[in-house]
Amino acid sequence: MNAAMNAAMPGVMPAPQVAVVVIGYDDAAHVADAVRSALAQGPAVREVVAVDDGSADGSAGLLDRLAAAEPRLKVIRRRVNSGGCGTPRNTGLDAVTSPYVMFLDSDDVLPPGAVDALLAAAAGARAEVTGGLCVRRELPSGREVPWQPRLYALHAVVPHPARRPRLVHDTLCVNKLYRTGFLREHGIRFPEGRFPYEDVVFTARVLAADPRIALVPDRVYVWHVRRSAERLSISLDRAGVVNWRARTEACRQAYEILLGAGQKELARASRAKFLDHDLRMYLRELGLRDASYQRAWWELTRAHLAEYDADDWARDPAAPGRLAGRVVLACPEPRDLPRLRELAARPARLRPPYARAADGTPVWSEDLPQISLEPLLTRPVRELPLAVDAALRPRARGTRLRLRLHELYGRVAQAGPETVEAEWRHRDDGTVVSCGTAALVPSTDSWSAETAVDLPALAAPGAGTWDLRLRLRFRDGVSRDVTAHALTSAGLLRRSAVPSARYGVVLVQPYTTHSGALALRVAPGVRGVLSVARGRLRRLLH
């Protein structure tokens, strides 16, 4: 019985077939946990190749001590730091002797059973690449958000990547098991040196080689997100425009790699992914940057989007990313940033003004009539970028949430909005506190509703942040989940100390998220108030 059959049969101990390449640089605080999580995968792991990329914090010595007690651990020291992640991964890949390989960053971990799940699927499907679910774990809160969950909802085998264009959205290299021979036969490697977003290019090279791919719903990778770290990861360090330049370059190379391999459908999908994911993410933050950054970002983005052709824009022209991209491309200087920020939200919100051209066609604005919004007239209501304004007024006699739904070229009235369900969702643990259902009352070009907010229920878990979520219901039973734009006039975002019979006092701070949505910070009691004050001081010092 061969090793592949062993891996595929339940109850049979898997043969050692997998190498885990762990890379790290000056990460002595975490690298041991990463290596141990790889070794703890069990006998299926033949070797763990730890590549220290020129650390000066004692990481290499720590790895050597671990290797002295673990024969499966091989430590490779690079004398000079490469400046990126691609070179140490290539170094580790060159040292691998196992039939399969996967990659692990020093500040992340593999959850128990990850290798067994991937190896069993790879053997059973005879797949060159096997991917599983990655979760982003926010630290220190521990909140977990799945990465690309739609791809990994069910077990699946994809004989050719072009049959599942959504694969281009998962640009991570770490949540996958690769057949080592497949990578070597096709010369698939990471970009060398200081090349941020190297996994975007690596993934394009993998897909361009047309592998047979297996997908599993199992959790196979835990991506630790440390936003308060002194040295942010590449994906979080977006303050400088150089980061955006690197991202657009990686996406450009990915497109050229796929197109050059004859994978036209995947190449188109990669450009669509840029509009739907990358562009929207950075637009949500653009208003936070200074004027110099905004101008440089705008110029880079226009240059990148100028490479798109008519077919790239023609697919789903009312999609928020395509609409935002067309506005950027049409304007030589940054403009309409607050409105673009709302459009880039998830779900998208298109706020007034709702302009029309001389012939009555819906357009972006009076001075940008070439940006037609006519596709919105036929888009399903459940996909429309509906705009709701929200205002919260904390009061000792009862806190009220006021909502206003805007008309959108007659589509809202046509659908007949009836009710809105409001709830607050705790950002760390996902706890939900409902505000109930309220009727939407029509007026000129809008519908309004008001509901009570249970402050003691929001304060019960202690100091924390709550996001507002709404569900609009229409006459024919269709519903649309939305977030709400935070109104900022007349002191609506002022911090308030509300008397409470249960807690003595509850500190309430409505605020605007990066995407312009209403969120709420709540701290109960004097101790909670002090905790918020200390946290604010830490943020100011950081």
Image (spheres, rainbow, N blue to C red):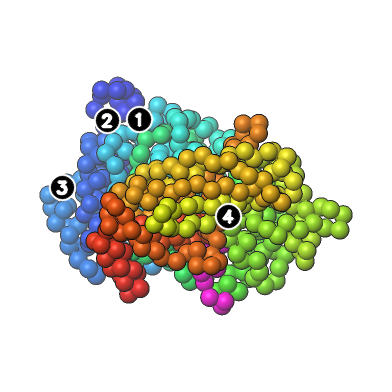
**Amino acid type at image mark 2:** Pro
Residue 59 spot, x, y in % from top left = 22, 62
- Element class at badge 4: strand
Q: Are marks 1 and 2 in contact (CB under 8 Å)?
A: yes
Choose the circle earlier in sequence order: 2 or 3: 2
**Amino acid type at image mark 1:** Ala
Query: Which contiguous range is marked in magenta?
Result: 282-292
* Residue 450 visible: yes
Provide the residue designation for mark 4: 389
Provide the residue designation for mark 3: 70
Task: Point out the residue furthest to the bottom here.
Answer: 292
Give how far apart the Cα atoms at labels 2 and 4 are: 56 Å
Q: Nearer the viewer, mark 2 or mark 4?
A: 4
**Amino acid type at image mark 3:** Glu
285 in the magenta segment: yes
Q: In the drawing, does residue 498 fall left or right of residue 438?
A: left
Provide the residue designation for mark 2: 14
Choose the circle earlier in sequence order: 4 or 1: 1
Quarter in which the C terminus is drawn:
bottom left
Choose the circle earlier in sequence order: 3 or 1: 3
